[in-house]
Image (tube, rainbow, N blue to C red):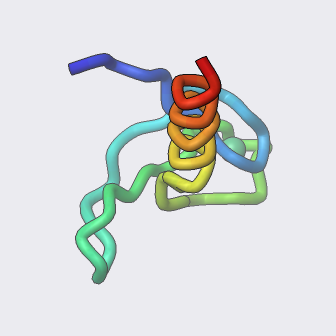
Amino acid sequence: MVLEPICCPACHTPDVVKNGKSDEGKQRYRCRNTKCSRASFIRDYTYQVSVDHKELRQGLNR
Ligand SMILES: [Zn+2]
């Protein structure tokens, strides 16, 4: 398992802490940056999925 840094989508600080789970069972995080307007967020997997698809396409083109 690869540990990836979790960053706040609003201020991009990696200084975040886990904050329970959402109703959908997704990991929720809380931004510890006091100047950030975003108190909590749910990790978005959309970016990871697009990267996976890109790698898949490159593999098929080879
Ligand atoms: Zn933030």
Q: Is residue 51 above or below residue 40?
A: above
| Quadrant where the image shows the C terminus | top right
**Residue at left offset 73%, top offset 34%:** 12
Q: How many marks?
A: 0
Q: Quadrant of residue 13?
A: top right
Residue 6 rendering spot, x and y as whole percentages: 50, 32
Q: Residue at x 26, y 60 (%)?
A: 20
User: In which quadrant of the rendered view does residue 54 lie?
Assistant: top right
Give the quarter the ligand 1 occupies: top right
Residue under the image location 50 percent in, 52 percent down = 45
- Residue 28, given in percent of the width and then of the height, sits at 38, 58
| 60 and 7: which is toward the camera | 60
Question: Where's the N terminus, which quadrant?
Answer: top left
Q: Is residue 60 left or right of residue 12?
A: left
Image: 39 above or below 25: above
Residue at x-position 33% and y-position 45%: 18
Q: Is residue 59 left or right of residue 61?
A: left
Where is 38 relative to 50, above or below? below
56 shown above or below 43 = above
In the image, 19 versus 23, the foreground residue is: 23
Q: Residue furthest bottom?
A: 23
Q: Position of residue 26 (x, y in %)?
A: 32, 64
Q: Position of residue 15 (x, y in %)?
A: 55, 27
